[in-house]
Image (cartoon, grey):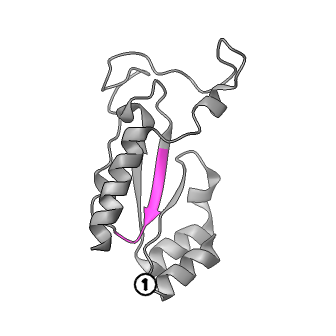
Amino acid sequence: SLKILQCCVENEIPYVLESPTSSFLWRTDNLLGFVNINGAIISSLDFCQYGMRWKKPTCLMHPRLPGLDSLLQCHGVQGVCSSTQRAHIKLHGRDPTGTFWTLRAQPYPLRLCNDIARILSANLV
């Protein structure tokens, strides 16, 4: 991934790398070196702020694309969502239909997709 991102940097192509906040990726020396050398930033967001019942903290690394650092984060306490005031669904085990919660939580919320698309298209103009 970093080789592709470096190619993007060299060719002035905007990029975004996404992974859950808990991913070991964000703590690797290679990624942190890329961030420092290329002036990238890591922005955080939570799926619960886009209509999902689970928090699913997620990070985006990008070359300071205006707007991506304004995506919404949950400020709830003790597992209660700041948006809905309801407890977050924990992403472990299976839902009542037998589907793993982590599988159910994989797709991006539509509202988040729309926000990211709007932000990226504004940066391409």
Helix, strand or loop under label 1 = loop
Find out whether residue 62 is within the magenta segment. Answer: yes
The residue where tag 1 is placed is 12
Q: Nearer the viewer, residue 32 or 20?
A: 20
Q: Is residue 61 above or below residue 55?
A: below
What residue is drawn where x is 41% and y is 47%? 113
Find out whether residue 24 is within the magenta segment. Answer: no
Q: Is residue 71 left or right of residue 5?
A: left
The stretch in magenta equals: 58-64
What residue is drawn where x is 69% and y is 26%? 100
Badge 1: few (under 14), some or many (20 or more) residues near its Cα, within 10 Å? few
Q: Is residue 44 left or right of residue 32?
A: left
Q: Position of residue 60 (x, y in %)?
A: 46, 56
Q: Is residue 37 above or below residue 27?
A: below
**Quarter occupied by the N terminus:** bottom right
Q: Position of residue 43 (x, y in %)?
A: 39, 55
**Quarter occupied by the C terminus:** bottom left
Q: Is residue 30 left or right of residue 9?
A: right
Residue found farthest to the bottom: 10
Residue found farthest to the right: 98
What residue is drawn where x is 45% and y is 79%? 13
Give the prevailing secondary structure in the magenta stretch. Answer: strand
Q: Position of residue 77 (x, y in %)?
A: 36, 24
